[in-house]
Image (cartoon, helix red, strand yellow):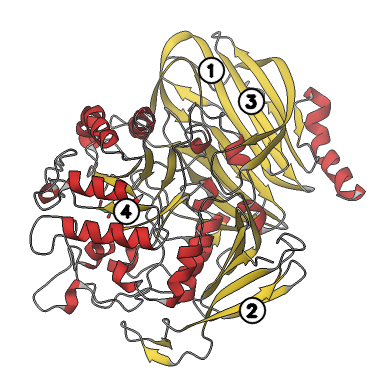
Amino acid sequence: MNRRTLVAIMASLAMAACDNDMTLLSPDSNIGTSVSIDENGTPHYQLTAYGQEIIGTSAMGLAALEANLGSGFEVIKVQRGKADMEWTQPWGENKQMRDRHNEMAVVMKNDEGVELTARFRAFDDGIGFRYEYAAPVDSLTIVGDNTYFNFAQDGTSWTIGSYFSGYELPYREQAISATENANTPFTFQMGQVYGSIHEAALYDFPEMNLYRQDSLDFKSELAPRPDGTLARTGGKFVTPWKTIQIARDAVGLINSSLILNLNEPCAIEDVSWIRPQKYVGVWWGMHLGTQVWTMGPRHGATTENALRHIDFAAANNIGGVLFEGWNKGWENWGGSQHFDYCEPYEDFDLDRIAAYAAEKGVSLWMHNETGGSIFEYEAILDKAFSKYQSLGVHYLKTGYAGGMPDGIRHHSQRAVQHYQKVVEKAAEYQIAIDAHEPIKETGIRRTWPNMMTREGARGMEWNAWSEGNSAEYQCILPFVRLLGGPMDYTPGVFDIYYKTACATPGREAWNGDNSKTYIKTTLARQIANWVLIYSPLQMACDLIENYEGHPAFQFFRDFDPDCDWSEALAGEIGDYLVIARRAGDRYFLGAGTNSEARTISVALDFLEPGVTYDAAIYADDLDAPVITQPDGSQAADKTCYRIEHRKVTSADTLEIAMAADGGQAVSFIPVLQ
Ligand code: NOJ
Ligand code: CA
C-alpha cells in the first residue's frame, strides 16, 4: 500500500477514532471498521477498504419481545486482541491455513441491564462481526435483526433473490441500487473494490437475507418461524458472524479464507475416516427420465446395475458409488413424503452390494431423500445410521426436496438445528454428509469436517429439465455461492445432446417435457468444472456407459479431489475464471468462459520448479462445425474437443483458447526422470 492510501484510510477513520477510539484495522491496515453509539444509545458501524468507504454508518442491534437489545446502550469497555496462527484441515481447497486478525469487542450495557457485545474481527481479506448477548432475561424471542448494510456508493451486485426455503434460483447481475432483496453471499463490485456479504458459523439461528430499505441501505431479515417470530434463544447466546469479504480483484474473493477462519476448530477427534473422493452413481438417468427411483421395469437401483457401477468405479480409480432409489418409499414422494431409510427395494440386494463394494475397495454411499420430513427423519437417525455403519458406509447424500412440516421454512432456526443434528449424529457413526436442499454453507466444515459438501444452488440436474445452467451462470457461481464453501454440483455430462425420456414415444420425464434440453457448455468445460467447482466429493454424473472407452474420461481417472493447495489465477465475475489446484505431486487446472470465446495466457509458475510435467490438455475444438441445437438455435457442436500432450515446466506459459460456452482442463503429472 502506498503512503497516500494509508493517509486516506487514516483520515476516513479519524473521526470515529478520536471521539471514542472504537476503530479496528486489519493487520495490513488496508481495511478498517469503526463503531459509534448514536444519541439513542444504538450502536453503528462503518467499513472502509483501500481508502474507499464501502459501508457507510449503519445501525446494529437485535429486537426481542422480552428485552431491549437495540438502544439505550453505553459502552462499558472496549477489549482488543489479535491472533496470528497456522492451522491445518483434513481436507479443503488448501490444507494449510493462516488466521491473522485483529479483534475488538465493544461491550455495552443498557438501562434494562442488557449486556450486548459487538465483537469485530478484521482480517486482510475482510471483516466479521457478531452479537454476544447476556442478560437478566433468561429466554428470548427474537423478532428483528436491525443490522444494516448501508453501501457507501452504487456498484454492481451478483445475487440470487431472497427466499427462505431454497437456493436454486438464477443469478442476477444488477446495480446494487436495483437489488430489492437477496440471499447471501451478496457479491458486489464498488469502484476498485470487490466484496461479498455473507455469514460464518450459522448455528441455532435463522439465516440472514438482505432487504433494501431505500437507496443503498439494506437491512438484515432473518428466515422466520411459522408464527412469524424469528428465533428462540436462551439467556446467553452468540449470533453467527456477519461477514464482509473484501478483495482488490474478483479472484481475491475466491482465494479468501475469511469464512473458515471465523469458524471454530475441529470438534471431531479422529478425522482419519473423512476422506475426499470421486464418485459415480445411478442418478442422471432419473433426471432424464429414462430411469426411475421406484421399483419397476425402469428402476435404476437394481442389484445388477449396482454391481456394474462398482466394477466401473474399481476399474477407473473412482472411490465411491451412489444409488438413488435403493430404499422403499419413493412411491410417496410428492405426496405423504414417507421414505423408509432402512429397507431396500426387493430388487436391490443391499447386503450383497455392500459386500461386493467392500471386496472391490469401493465406498458404498447411502442416499436419504426426506422430501422435507425432518421430524420423521430425526426419529430414525440412530437406527438408520447404525445400520449404515454396520454395512461399512462412510458417505451419505441427504435431500430435502419438499416442504417441511408445520410450515417450517428450510432456512429457519428449526431447520438449521435439524441440518446440524444430522451432521453431529452422522459424526457419531463415522458418516460424512453431502446435503442437497441444504442450509447455506457458512464454513462449519472447519468444525465438522464430516459436513463435506452440499448443493444449495442450481446444480447439474437443472440441465435435464429446465432452460439449464448457462456458461455465464457457471462463471458467476464460484464468485457467489462457492464463497460459502464446497458444492456438489455433480459436473461432467459427456453426452451433451443426451436422449431424454421424451425421446421414447409414450414416456414422460417426471418433471415435464424435456425433449429440447441439453447441456449448455462444451464437453471440455464439463471436464474443467471438476476443477472449477470445488467439492471434496466430486461426481462424474453422466451414465457410466457414456464414459466407457471415452478418451477424455482419462482426466477424471487422473483427477484427485484431495487438494493440498488451490489458487484462482484469473477471472471476472460472469465472464471467465481460471483455477489451479495441487493434490500431492499432481496439479490440475480448470478454465471456463461465458458465451464469448476467449484466450487467456496463464504462467505455469505455480508448478514445482525444476520438475517436468506431462500436461494433458483437454481443450475445445475451435473448428467445431455449427449445428442446430435441440432448442433450434445455431451454435458450434459442443461435443467437439481435442486432447494434446505437452512437456512443461514452471517456466512455461499456457495459451488457453476457449470456444463460446467453453473451457479447458489440464492435468500436470510429473514425468519420472
Ligand atoms: C434433488 C437433488 O438435488 C437430486 O440430486 C436428487 O436426485 C433428487 N432431489 C432426489 O433425491
Ligand atoms: Ca436440488
Query: Distance between the Cα atoms at labels 2 and 1?
Result: 53 Å
Query: Distance between the Cα atoms at labels 1 and 4?
Result: 46 Å
Above or below for 61 versus 396: above
* Numbered badge on residue 505: none
Q: Amino acid at mark 3?
A: Arg
Looking at the image, residue 462 sits to the left or right of residue 608; the answer is left
Q: Amino acid at mark 2?
A: Thr
The residue that mark 1 highlights is 133
Q: Amino acid at mark 4?
A: Val
Q: Amino acid at mark 1?
A: Tyr
Q: In the rendered structure, which disc, 4 or 3, sits on the residue that comes first in sequence? A: 3
* The residue carrying mark 1 has its beta carbon less than 8 Å from ligand 2: no
Measured as percent of width and height from the top left, residue 221 is found at: 45, 38
Looking at the image, residue 254 sits to the left or right of residue 30; the answer is left
Above or below for 90 versus 527: above
Q: Are marks 2 and 1 in contact (CB under 8 Å)?
A: no
Q: What residue appears at the point 71 percent right and 27 percent down from the top-left corner?
A: 103
Badge 3 local density, few (<14 within 10 Å), some, or many (20+)?
many
Q: Nearer the viewer, mark 1 or mark 4?
A: 4
The residue that mark 4 highlights is 321
The residue that mark 3 highlights is 119
